[in-house]
Amino acid sequence: MTELSRSTEDYLKAIYGLGRSGEPVPTGALADALAIAPASVSGMVRRLAETDLIAHEPYRGVQLTDAGRRAALRVIRRHRILETYLVKVLAWDWDSVHAEAERLEHAASDLLVARMADALGNPAFDPHGAPIPTVDGEIEEQELVPLTELGVGGTGEFRLVSDDDAERLRYIASIGFRVGTRFELVEVTPFRGPLTVLRRELGASPQLIGYELAQSLLCLPCTLEPAA
Amino acid sequence: MTELSRSTEDYLKAIYGLGRSGEPVPTGALADALAIAPASVSGMVRRLAETDLIAHEPYRGVQLTDAGRRAALRVIRRHRILETYLVKVLAWDWDSVHAEAERLEHAASDLLVARMADALGNPAFDPHGAPIPTVDGEIEEQELVPLTELGVGGTGEFRLVSDDDAERLRYIASIGFRVGTRFELVEVTPFRGPLTVLRRELGASPQLIGYELAQSLLCLPCTLEPAA
DNA sequence: AGTCAAGATTAGGTATGACTAAGACATTAT
DNA sequence: ATAATGTCTTAGTCATACCTAATCTTGACT
Ligand SMILES: [Mn+2]
Ligand SMILES: [Mn+2]
Ligand SMILES: [Mn+2]
Ligand SMILES: [Mn+2]
């Protein structure tokens, strides 16, 4: 197995992210995700299929092979360990690590990543709440719901947000939300209107959150009543 | 000024290293240093000259322009800060950091390198004794001599060794030599024969060093007698 | 001056990975 | 059943960066 190129690794990562449902990933979706012309994706898909990293059904979509999935998870592990290291050790902001990790993930050796993981105590989640695959390629996807699905009066814990929009991350931090923040959903307005949440913290005041933003905040519902 | 490619940065770095004398660097010397066919170097040299990073006199050699020298020193700074960080913070061995830095230097941002430099207290030398250029591109080349030029009875301080041969670095460490080690040259044998040195340390015993290896150990002579 | 060898360049080719424009396919609407 | 639509692929091009083989330049030696 020879070294994979930067492009190859980014394609595999994108395919992994878009294909978690199990459905084949249309090449057009890949093109959107990677900001590359559809025709270019068709060409790359041919090469990836030739090296057996993906399976391609023309006009249907692509799926990772076992080798492809392993390679994708290795890159994802590198990416997330790097992000965590930058934030925890080098005091990087959580909104700017993604761009840096997006390049370093292709240059950092597994050994370097192992050293960083050790220094961090082998964390299970990155700064945005995404699970970090183990060295053996195990990853446990979490069962989370968007804040918008929580229901009025519900209590939840903010656990995960996509890291691809630095502005959004900055805003989320600015209203006091971090991964692990507990809150109550106190009000919901109809027609995809704003929501009001109250953090479970001393001195916290109600906070308005737009519907779109709320959709991007993935939460663990904490309502422990149903057992009654 | 657009992002430079990995190859471009490695060429500039090599040209800087080979051209410190001020003389133009023959493309063949570049080809040797980079382990790339001479014809390929000719092609790359044309592109580098077109973008005004180097000046090329056909059949004579190449020289860095001001822009090229600045770019080269930025890469060298990144490389050496990275090596130092790996050794000092992540407990990396001094013989294996070079390969890692050779890739990371093209992916790490100036901001990341600045953070690492800060964490290290802005060091002036890398783990092999090479000077680290400042952010403004200042670098002070040291006046060092090979151990072989020290003269019998001379005292010196080991200050710099090339980091491109991991085996050699491991051996040097195994005989108790680090950057900063003081020693006396107690014996020299003719016809490029082995030298005997004695470290200025408690419990140190005489150490044989082959001529070739001794040539690669650059030292600061400590003989403070001439002032008499 | 003429020859030769070493070194450098040019010529022609390959692989990667991107693009635009044109054509093919599948699905949905008429 | 046919036509329209959006999606996907193919065809052809380009830039980068490497290769081998052939040609050219330079400087040194006869
Ligand atoms: Mn990320
Ligand atoms: Mn990437
Ligand atoms: Mn190095
Ligand atoms: Mn390099």
Image (cartoon, coloured by chain):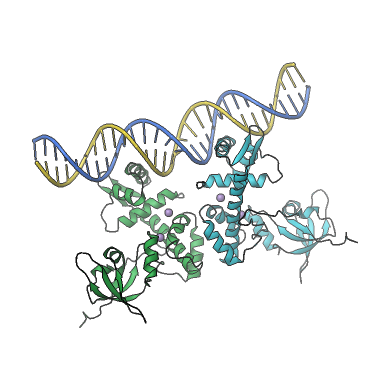
Chain colours: A green, B cyan, C yellow, D blue
The image shows residue C14 at horizontal and vertical percentages of 45, 35
Instruction: State the image quarter where residue C26 is shown.
Output: top left
Of the pair B138 and B36, the residue shown nearer to us: B138
Q: Looking at this view, name the residue that lies furthest to the right.
A: B228
Q: Residue at x 36, y 49 (%)?
A: A35
The image shows residue B64 at horizontal and vertical percentages of 63, 42
Instruction: State the image quarter where residue A74 is shown.
Output: bottom left
- Vertical relation: B151 (above or below) D2: below
Q: Is residue B91 visible?
A: no
Image position of D5 (left or right of B11): left
Instruction: State the image quarter where residue B53 is shown.
Output: top right
Of the pair A205 and B24, the residue shown nearer to us: A205
The image shows residue D4 at horizontal and vertical percentages of 16, 39
Image position of A153 (left or right of B224): left
Q: Is residue B161 visible?
A: yes
Q: Quadrant of the C terminus of chain A?
A: bottom left
The image shows residue A2 at horizontal and vertical percentages of 46, 49
